[in-house]
Amino acid sequence: MNVKIEESWQKVLQDEFEKPYFKELIQFVKQEYATTQVYPPGKQIFHAFEECPFDKVEVVILGQDPYHGQGQANGLAFSVNHGIRTPPSLRNIFKEIKDDLGKEIPDNGNLERWAEQGVLLLNATLTVRANTAGSHQNKGWETFTDAAIKKVSDLKENVVFMLWGAYAQKKGAIIDATKHLVLKAAHPSPFAADKGFFGTHHFSKANAYLKEHGKKEIDW
């Protein structure tokens, strides 16, 4: 199957595109886009891969679903488009960065600037029906994104994985912690941030690890 995805990812994920589950997934997704409102826009489904090619991945931040409100989702986990109000979880991420690194909170929630530096902002599910959280879960996306995570773990070294919340932490089972840094914390949502997200210093820890291994620090 010919999938329009960034070239380096095309190479490492080619086997997935030929599997029955993926073909069924694509049929489901096409039907959803044809019959109802789905986010993100179709051309941004693989935006996380486009903005952060496989050979540039230095940090992986895992989300669950795209935002399901109008104009929010742009294909990058936790990120929203310019002009869209910063969602609560992302506000908490910015607060932690300020406490950790002293950086001022930005005036927008578009995280493309992170992706361009090698941060793979990957949701486990890459599409969602408007106003219906979780509506595209268990259709095959999780199998696909697990494969992407495993490729990063298997084929690269010294990558930082940030796993926030129980859902993301389950993905730790497919990450080789002997050659990567795996950082775990509570989810940054308002319901959980006070229970183990704030004060974890993940961003300074990530940069220290990257620097230690001769890599460029992320400008968070």
Image (spheres, rainbow, N blue to C red):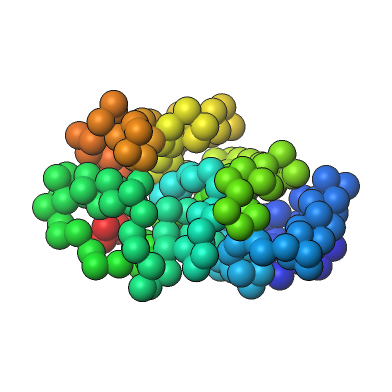
Residue drawn at the location 54% of the way across and 28% of the way down: 170
Q: Is 25 left or right of 147, judged from the image as shown?
A: right
* x and y, in percent, of residue 14 in the image: 76, 57
Which residue is located at x 52 percent, y 32 percent?
167
Q: Is residue 192 visible?
A: yes
- Return the residue nearer the eye: 212 or 2: 2
Q: Quadrant of the N terminus?
A: bottom right
User: Which residue lies at the image location 61% right of the left edge and 69% below the top edge?
Assistant: 41
Quadrant in the rendering for residue 34: bottom right
Residue 135 percent location from the top left of the image: 66, 46
Q: Residue drawn at (34%, 63%), measured in percent from left and top?
A: 85
Q: Position of residue 88 (x, y in %)?
A: 33, 49
Left or right of residue 116: residue 197 = left
Q: The C terminus is located in which quarter?
A: bottom left
Above or below — where is 48 with respect to 135?
Answer: below
- Relative vertical location of residue 194 with respect to residue 74 in this rendering, above or below: above
Most extreme residue toward the left is 102
Residue, far right: 20
